[in-house]
Structure formats: structure tokens, C-alpha cells
Image (tube, coloured by chain):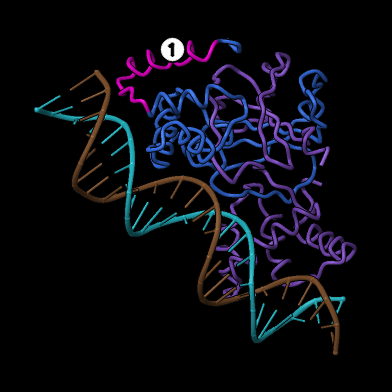
Chain colours: A purple, B blue, C brown, D cyan
Amino acid sequence: MVSMMIQEKVNKFIGRSKELGIKVTPQRIAIYKELASTDQHPSTETIYKKIKDYYPNISLTTVYRTLETFEKLGLISVVNVLYNAARYDANLDPHHHIVCTECKKVEDVYDESLNNLDISNKTLGDYKVEGYSLLLSGVCTSCRSN
Amino acid sequence: MVSMMIQEKVNKFIGRSKELGIKVTPQRIAIYKELASTDQHPSTETIYKKIKDYYPNISLTTVYRTLETFEKLGLISVVNVLYNAARYDANLDPHHHIVCTECKKVEDVYDESLNNLDISNKTLGDYKVEGYSLLLSGVCTSCRSN
DNA sequence: GTCCTTGCAAAAGTTTTGCAAGGTG
DNA sequence: CACCTTGCAAAACTTTTGCAAGGAC
């Protein structure tokens, strides 16, 4: 799966789009292909700029709308759920977070057993790792009751 | 530490500020106190609004600048490192991410042993958990050589 | 041909910057 | 009283929305 050829991924995407009943446009293919071609998770703007090289008419609005559509249908996922505004933390002790996917509320999660994960060196590649934190996602009570 | 009284946290903050050589202003105390009083990780705007209730002259700019200052000095930390722009992922297989704290580049991390963490039920409180992902942070090779 | 999708322009929302006035150490 | 910090206003940036034209099915 990881090493699946780009074209194969795109074909799968086209099939899935048809199943979902959304239209397969050149813009959508370009956007999906751009995203599937890298593991660097570019921003919307970056995707837009890359596509513009060979598809100069594409609009940034389309990239925004398309990524949102794909995400809602489960064709892609958001890496950073909390991208809309900076969130700070006065608590510097090691702990993790859980975010409500509905209301975007974030709360602390304390679980000692998660503070000393053994992360194999080979996964880290050429990074000098400073730390990690776990972001759990779910739906909080008050959102579930709505 | 977790249950340390707010005033105690604020006092510690004031002492640390003096050590660091930054000025202790009423605005800074208010901002720190607001952040230290909750585990909900409000956005900059939310902090601003709360403080405005009892300190109507405070400026949103000050809140932005102050939080940035605190973060750079290590007085607080950012929950969502990648808050400046949406980042998407075409790869729906379970995997994690590592972000370079310098250039904000994000890459995939594959490590089977991290895909089935045993998260104790009591930590999850009243959330219905859908999933989790690990965000490692570090400095990539190209940023380290600069 | 129908209706979803696109592109443009404008609006809304978030964050940063310049500068003069004010307050801390 | 020096210099850091604040507040205001404006600019820069990111994301969303309305609407008419265009294209997929």
C-alpha cells in the first residue's frame, strides 16, 4: 500500500469518487495526485502553486473546496485537526490531548503509560527528536447529545 | 503539580519572568492566569475575550504578542504546532507524523508498535474515542545543518 | 440538459507589523 | 529615565461565500 504507484492510487481514487457519486474533474484528479505523490503534507497553498505550473487556470478556491470535500467523504484526512487557531498550554508537565472533532474543544489527557513510548530509532530517520505528543480524537458528551 | 493552586502558578510565573529578564505587566499576568486556569486550551481570541471582561482596554495584539513571547521563552507551549495552515493526507493507512520545529515540514512515520497503544479507559473520560495519532517533533537534517 | 463544480471577486477571519504613548525595573 | 511593552490602525495572510459560467454524467 505504501509503495503503491501513484497512477494506481489515482485510479482507485477515481473509482471511489464514482461510487460516492461525485464528479471526476481534471482539477480534482490534479489535486488528489499532488497529495498522493508526496508524504510531506503540503499546505493548501503549496498544492495550489504546484498544480498551477501545469494547470495555470486553477483557482485557489477550488483547491480549498476540493480538499474539504475529499476530507468530508473520507478520501483524504486532515493531519492537523486544530489548524484554525493557535492553542497554547501553560502546563509544561508531560501529558497528551484529546480533541472533540465536532466542537474542536481540547482537553488534557494524563496517562503515565503513554509518556515513555519506545520509539524505534529507525523510524526516526534523520531527525533529532525532541519529543512527542499524542492527539486523541473523539466526540465529547455534549456534542454527542446534540 | 497538576492541582497546584492558580495563584501559586502565577507566582512561579512571575519569578521565572524576572529570572528571564522580561517585564511583569498586568496584561502578562492576566494572560498567564487565564491560560493557567483551564485545561481547555482556548484560542488567542478566546483568552482575549475573557480578559476583556475585567480589563476592557487590553488589545488583541498584546495577547498575540504575549503568547508568542511566552512560548519562545518556554513559559508555555503550543498545543498545535501546525496551526498556520491546513495539512492533508492522502494516505489513510494508520501511521504517525514527525514535524520539523524549524521549517514546519511534516513527514510520515511508520511504526507498527505505535499503532495499537493500549489507552486506559479512565483517561478517556466521557469521550467516545475515534482514534489517535502521534506527533513527534524534532529538527530535520537540513535545518540542523543551517 | 441537469445539476454539480469551477473561477472570480469580495468578505470574513486570523496573525503580523509600524509607530507613538505609556509603564516597568 | 531608558527601554521594553502596549494599543491602535493598517497590512498581510488564510479561508469562506455568492454568483454566473462551464463541464461531467
**Could you tell whether D9 is left or right of B55 in the image?**
left
Closer-to-camera residue (B14/B83):
B14
Query: Could you tell me which chain the residue with mark 1 belongs to?
Result: B
Q: Which residues are magenta?
A: B5-26
Looking at this view, name the residue that lies furthest to the right: A19
Point out residue B129 in the picture as x, y percentages from the top left corner.
Answer: 81, 32
Quadrant placement of the N terminus of chain B: top right
Q: Residues within 10 Å of mark 1 (few under 14, many from 20)?
A: few
Point out residue A11 in the picture as x, y percentages from the top left corner.
Answer: 82, 63
Which residue: 83% across, 20% down?
B121
Q: Identify whether B85 is placed above or below A108.
A: below
Q: Residue at label 1?
A: B12
Closer-to-camera residue (A121/B104):
B104
Amino acid carrying label 1: it is Lys
Point out residue A53 in the picture as x, y percentages from the top left corner.
Answer: 56, 69
Which residue: 80% across, 26% down?
B126
**Could you tell whether C14 is left or right of B29 in the image?**
right
Point out residue C11 in the picture as x, y percentages from the top left corner.
Answer: 53, 65
Helix, strand or loop under label 1: helix
Closer-to-camera residue (B90/B38):
B38
**Could you tell whether B51 is left or right of B91 in the image?**
left
Which residue: 79% across, 32% down?
A141
Quadrant placement of the C terminus of chain B: top left
Name the image quarter holding residue A13.
bottom right
Which residue: 30% across, 20% down?
B21
Q: Identify whether A61 is placed above or below A134.
A: below
Q: Is residue A18 magenta?
A: no
Closer-to-camera residue (A91/A76):
A91
**Mostly what secondary structure, the magenta segment?**
helix
Number of labels in the image equals 1
Q: Is residue B11 magenta?
A: yes
